[in-house]
Structures are given as structure tokens and as C-alpha cells.
Image (cartoon, rainbow, N blue to C red):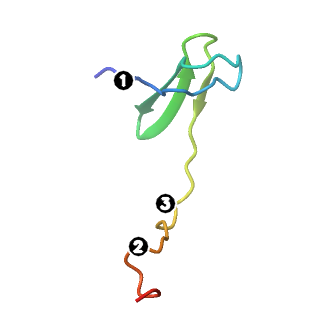
Amino acid sequence: MSEVKRFIAGAVCPQCGVADKLRMFERAGDYYRDCVNCGFEEKMAFDERPPPATDRIGSDRDR
């Protein structure tokens, strides 16, 4: 099965600095990004899931 690579809109390559040339794809359960301009490739590291966003909508504080 081939890898599905999707471009990341507005992203700038950290190696060559060109915008809109980075793609993201999954390989063996890990996520990677690569640049079609210079050949840069990097495994993407994600921290744990971020905490839920907090806002005042629906809170009991203002009722």
C-alpha cells in the first residue's frame, strides 16, 4: 500500500525556508513531514494530548 502524502498549507520548510512545499504522511504508525523542494524529512513528535480548551461559554461562574 502506498503512503498518502498531504501538503500542509502555509507551512515553511525548516531547512530551505520555502513555503507550501511540506507534506505530512504516516509510515508504520508514525507521522512524518517532508519537503518536495529540498528533500528534508523528519519524524513528527507529538506530546500527550493537550488539555481541553477553557472558555467562559457554558461555565457556571457567570450565572
User: Residue 19 appears at what percent x and percent y?
Assistant: 60, 19
**SS class of the residue under badge 1?**
loop
In the image, residue 26 sits, relative to residue 54, either above or below, namely above
Q: Earlier in the sequence, mark 2 or mark 3?
A: 3
Mark pair 1, 3: CA separation: 25 Å
Question: Which kind of residue does numbered mark 1 sit on?
Answer: Glu
Task: Please identify the quarter of the rendering in which residue 35 is found.
Answer: top right
| Amino acid of disc 2 | Ile
Q: Amino acid at mark 3?
A: Arg
Q: Is residue 34 above or below residue 38?
A: below
Residue lying at 65% horizontally and 16% vertically, measured from the top left:
18
Outermost residue on the left side: it is: 1
Query: Residue 51 versus residue 26: which sits nearer the camera?
Result: 51
Residue 4, percent from left and from top? 35, 24
Query: Residue at position x 70%, y 19% from top?
Result: 17
For label 3, the SS is: loop
Tags 1 and 3 touching, CB below 8 Å: no
Residue depicted at 41% across the width and 33% down the height? 26
Q: Secondary structure at mark 2?
A: loop
Disc 2 to disc 1, how far (Cα)? 41 Å
Say the numbered circle drawn on residue 17: none
Task: Look at mark 2 in the image and give the residue it sits on.
Answer: 57
Along the line of sight, which residue is nearer the eye, 44 or 2?
44
Judged left or right of residue 47, residue 28 is: left
List x then y, in percent, for residue 32.
51, 32
The residue under label 3 is 49
- Identify the residue at horizontal 48%, vertical 66% (top origin): 53
Q: Residues within 10 Å of mark 3 (few under 14, many from 20)?
A: few
Nearer-N-terminus badge (1/3): 1
